[in-house]
Image: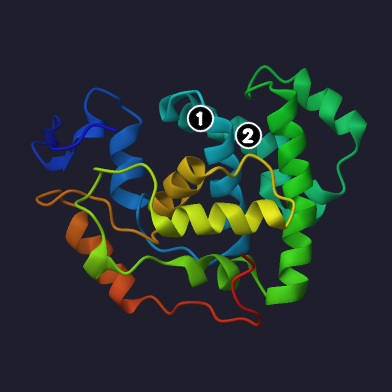
Amino acid sequence: MTTGLTYDHDGLPRCGWCAGVAAYPAYHDQEWGFPVDDDTRLFEKLCLEGFQSGLSWRTILTKRPAFRAAFAHFDIERVAAFTESDVLRLLADAGIVRHRGKIEAVINNARRALEMRARHGSLGAFFWQYEPDPVHSPPPQTVSTCAESVALSKALKKLGWKFVGPTTVYAFMQAMGMINDHVPGCIAREPVDSARAQFVRPQGSGAHDC
């Protein structure tokens, strides 16, 4: 992602990565960085970050409606029940990224997500344990991993999750509001800070699995 600010047609300052991509401002202003605790949304965000690996986020965001239709709107129980026939169906779906490893990873991760729910109460309760301390965080958009993303990646891999490397996990943490990585001066930075201040972190049972 490009650091600094950009000014779109409305003249408002946004993170530099919004420049020149029509689909980005709405996603940036309304979603990116705002805290999430809903399991379905968390599962979707982590799956889409896995699909983004090696590609541009623009591609994934453009295809997101097709991904939602293809993967039962990321309903964890429904995706966990997918079979090889679903894999073949998805490989034939031109609306999504047709990568067998990533498709199979989503199905695998849905099954691991059910296990996580059973053990921790929710995905949110598990993920939010790894929230970095903002006091010691680096300046926005200057790193692609952090100690917490490395730890969460390690924990997820230990639990059998796929396509959850530290960079993918860091992008997930940015997207789901565990980190406010909007740059200073960006119109979304203060609203995200406010949302994070009011956000009640989900609680569950169990400690870090790493």
Disc 2, SS: helix
Tell me where residue 59 appears, x and y as whole percent. Answer: 47, 24
Image point (51%, 24%), residue name: 54
Q: Please state, as top left, top right, bottom left or bottom right, where the C terminus lies in the image.
A: bottom right
Question: Does label 2 or label 1 sit earlier along the sequence?
Answer: 1
The answer to the question of whether label 2 and label 1 lie on touching residues, with beta carbons closer than 8 A, is yes
Tell me where residue 7 appears, x and y as whole percent. Answer: 11, 33
Tell me where residue 101 appears, x and y as whole percent. Answer: 73, 29
Residue 120 vs 53, above or below: the answer is: below
Residue 21 vs 15, above or below: the answer is: above
Toward the viewer: 71 or 183? 183
Instruction: Report the disc number at residue 60.
Output: 1
Residue 176 shows in the view: no
The residue that label 2 is drawn on is 67
Q: Quadrant of residue 11?
A: top left
What's the residue type where badge 1 is placed? Ile
Total marks placed = 2
Residue 80 vs 179, above or below: the answer is: above
Q: Quadrant of residue 154?
A: bottom right
Q: Please state, as top left, top right, bottom left or bottom right, where the N terminus lies in the image.
A: top left
Which class describes the residues within 10 Å of circle 2: few (<14), some (14-19), or many (20+)?
many
Residue 34 shows in the view: yes
Q: Quadrant of residue 138?
A: bottom left
Image point (72%, 66%), residue name: 116
Image point (59%, 71%), residue name: 208
Q: What whole-number distance in Å separates the C-alpha atoms at marks 2 and 1?
A: 9 Å
Which class describes the residues within 10 Å of circle 1: few (<14), some (14-19), or many (20+)?
some
What's the residue type where badge 2 is placed? Phe
Image-based side of 116 in relation to 46, left or right: right
Image-based side of 153 in relation to 109, left or right: left
Toward the viewer: 22 or 178? 178
